[in-house]
Amino acid sequence: MIGTKSRDTLAEAVADADALAPASSRPGVLRALLGHRTGVVGLVIVVVVALVALAAPLLAPDDPTRVDALRRLAPPSPDAPLGTDNLGRDILSRLIWGARLSLGTAGLAALLILTIGVGLGMIAGFYGGLLDDLLMRVVDVLLAFPALILALAIAGVLGPSIASVMIGIVTVAWADYARVMRGQVLAARERQYVEAARATGVRDARILARHLLPNVLPPILVLASLEMGGLILTISGLSFLGLGAQPPTPEWGAMLNDGRAFIGSAPQLMLFPGLAISIVVVGFNLLGDGLRDAFDPHLRD
């Protein structure tokens, strides 16, 4: 039985839990990121590409799917700054619209992966027992197979489409996040502010959302930012193999596949989509490095 004074102390501890400043909410994190040179470079790259994707209807000089046989494989010109492909379609317009599809698909897949992985990982780590054992055995099974091969198999069974690629990637990738989140929650659930919240009758859902999630989320956000580049590579790779976006949809991996037959006579068909993928992947990797250092209090101080 807890006395009145003890309950007051515990209530204060619960209130202090909100002030236990998860790294993601501290102003010092943003300052540290902006002071991280490579992190700023990565942030600028990601923001610029995202803005280009959002403004694709305004920035693209031509319809990305318009076929014009009269200007097939045309070199760069004022009308087509990066030239045209084997069907006379403007490469720059297809790159700009491809940014929308490539980043949008990767962003939606990342959101789904985080939602599933973080949610199941928190439940497994917080409640433990049989539920934890069952969820972790599913994770073990998924992690026992090479992720790309398993995603390739799932996308192949579902049929070629960008939706199939997304389902295949999400089905495989959430397991890593669930395992990391489970480990974070296992360590955090024994801390005093969690015990104080339990002792004062705070519901489990509030403990998970209000006290645990903000304090265990930063490592997951760093992991997500570092793996966004790999996610874009995977989506582009599956599209390159013909399992993702289908013609005439402009997508960077599909553009690489379209230009493969012309690598000798028109290398720009593969060069520009390859550069676009490389720049975005480097941008996310640099941003992830910056976030990792910004969230680390030892590196900030």
Image (cartoon, grey):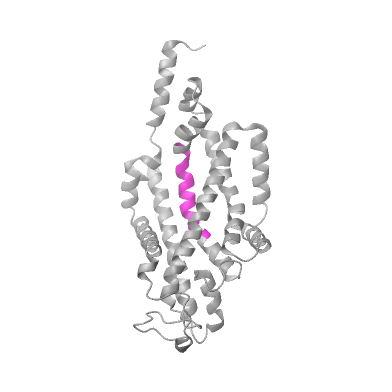
The picture places residue 8, in percent across and down from the top left corner, at 41, 16
The residue that appears at 59% across and 65% down in the rendered structure is: 161
The residue that appears at 56% across and 75% down in the rendered structure is: 257
The picture places residue 185, in percent across and down from the top left corner, at 53, 36
The residue that appears at 41% across and 58% down in the rendered structure is: 286
Horizontally, residue 201 falls left or right of residue 13, namely: right
Residue at the extreme bottom: 70
The residue closer to the viewer here, 32 or 150, is: 150
Picture mark count: 0
The picture places residue 46, in percent across and down from the top left corner, at 39, 60
The residue that appears at 57% across and 44% down in the rendered structure is: 178
Above or below: residue 222 compared with residue 59: above
Q: In which quarter of the image is residue 38?
A: bottom left
Q: Is the magenta stretch mostly helix, strand or loop?
A: helix
The picture places residue 132, in percent across and down from the top left corner, at 64, 36
Above or below: residue 255 compared with residue 261: above
Above or below: residue 169 compared with residue 196: below
Above or below: residue 140 compared with residue 46: above
The residue closer to the viewer here, 88 or 81, is: 88
The question of residue 269 being in magenta is answered with no
The question of residue 217 being in magenta is answered with yes
Q: Quadrant of residue 15?
A: top left
Q: What range is drawn magenta here? A: 215-231
Horizontally, residue 88 falls left or right of residue 52, namely: right
**In the rendered image, which quarter contains the C terminus?**
top left
